[in-house]
Amino acid sequence: MTLLPFQHYHNWIDDDLASHLFHCLSESIAWQQEQLILYGKAVKVPREVAFYGDTGVNYVYSKKTHSALPWLPDLLQIYPSRIILRHSRCENYH
């Protein structure tokens, strides 16, 4: 199994903003439980997912294309961290 590189950035966001974002995002993120076809049967994926990104960004998983939902204003507050994640993924998966 290949894992994404992980770095922990201690205190990269202050406690008040973190609490605010957690509350707002837990209410506004459009979580979805997807289904896969395994051996001809529809099976629910055992997790909920939400995919946000720039317009036109897509990814394919289990032969299904997923399109990014538009960025939420609260997600844009942590936009610089998104760049860090994108660079990590580009180095290993593109």
Image: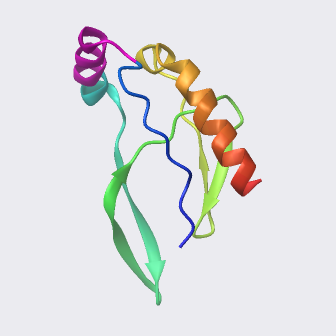
Q: Residue drawn 52% across and 34% down? A: 52
In this view, 14 is above or below 69: above
Q: Is residue 25 magenta?
A: no
2 with respect to 36 (left or right):
right
The part of the image, by quadrant, that contains residue 42 is bottom left
What x and y, as percent, mark residue 26? 26, 29
Residue at 25% from the left image edge and 14% from the top image edge:
15
Observer-nearest of 32 and 76 = 76
Q: Nearer the viewer, residue 10 or 69?
A: 10
Residue 45: give x, y in percent of width and height: 36, 66
User: Residue at left 56%, top 51%?
Assistant: 5
Q: Is residue 63 left or right of residue 79?
A: right
Residue 54 position, x and y percent, is 65, 29
Q: Is residue 46 above or below residue 17?
A: below
Q: Quadrant of residue 10?
A: top left
Residue interval drawn in magenta: 13-24
Farthest-out residue, bottom: 39
